[in-house]
Image: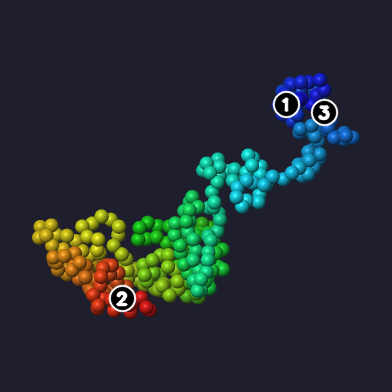
Amino acid sequence: MCLIQGCLNKVLSKGFCSTHYNQLRRSSITTKCSILNCSSPAIIKGLCNNHYHEQRKNSITVLCSAVGCKNMAISKGLCAKHRQQMKIFGKIRERTNRDKNETKTDNNITTMLIYNKEGETIAEAFFDSEFEKQIILHKWCMSGKENNKYIVTFDSNHHIIYLHHLIIKLSGQEVPIGKIIDHKDRNFLNNLLSNLRFSTQYQNAQNQSKSSKECSSKSKGVSWVKNVEKWKAQINVNGDYIYLGLFDTEEEATKAYNDAALYYFGEFAAPNIVKPSPIIDEILQKIFSV
């Protein structure tokens, strides 16, 4: 009920009914703090400013009901952060966009979990554990499309930082003029120093797998020629297409492209994944053992 003696109306605000609250705002009445011997005017819930805050400090502290959260609950049993999540997403998220990436280290290799906007794990990047202390200072995410994805973060000026660039810098190396950093195995998640090398833009383009676009063949450099009903193999060298021949099977055309790619591009070749001939198998072992 209203704090005004004899008033049985329901409380509207600060311990007063609508009528007396409006009177109080117009300064027609003043009410003292309900604490004995306190002559200060009541400003909220029948208490002066000092006694109101003292009561809040001495009241029971209720923790947020979200699992693992130690913040004080402020609304509906949740802290400010988790209350905001409920309003926006309709659920409490295990991670937020500000949480750092989780890591684990084994045999001098650190694996770092990569998350999407919903906080779900979508990939695992790995690098040499000697660079872990500097790398975990940032929040990392995935950027790009199809065959052009990378693990990135942003500095205080919102400039993009690539994980493989940072690793090269931490290793004490500098990218030579006219060169870029290439992943040997074409896996952007594999950022081990041994998997990074310098290449020209052209060499990097050769070290690319076939895109996921729908084509007549699943192999790079191979296509079906309808009018002759055969598989054609060709390769692009310095912007010029070299004809490699027509074949009865897709596998034969694929092997022809693989042989040509290894001949023209060497360690930067990206052969199609098929059961290789002994010659190709031997060359691949030499390339990826470097």
**Image marks 1 and 3: residues in contact by CB distance under 8 Å:** no
Q: Nearer the viewer, mark 2 or mark 3?
A: 2
- What label does residue 31 carry, if any? 3
Query: Which residue occupies 76% across, 42% down?
Result: 59
Task: Decide which of tag 2 and tag 3 comes sooner along the chain.
Answer: 3
Color encoding of the figure: rainbow
Label 1 – label 2 distance at C-alpha:
82 Å
Q: Residue furthest right?
A: 37
Instruction: Name the residue: 53% across, 44% down.
Output: 91
Residue in the picture at 53% in, 73% down: 130
Q: Exactly how many numbered labels are in the figure?
A: 3
Across and down, in percent, residue 143 comes to: 43, 57
Q: Quadrant of residue 223?
A: bottom left
Mark 1, secondary structure of its residue: loop
Q: Which disc, if any, is residue 284?
A: 2
Residue type highlighted by circle 2: Leu
Separation of marks 2 and 3 at Cα, in angstroms: 89 Å
Q: CA–CA distance between discs 1 and 3?
A: 15 Å
Where does the image place residue 70, in percent across and percent down from the top left?
65, 51
256, 145: nearer the viewer: 256
- Looking at marks 1 and 2 on the same chain, the residue that comes earlier in the sequence is marked by 1
Pointer 1 residue? 11
Q: Are marks 1 and 2 in contact (CB under 8 Å)?
A: no
Q: Amino acid at mark 3?
A: Thr
Q: Is residue 108 above or below residue 150?
A: below
For this view, does 39 lie left or right of residue 207?
right
* Residue ID at (53%, 66%): 104
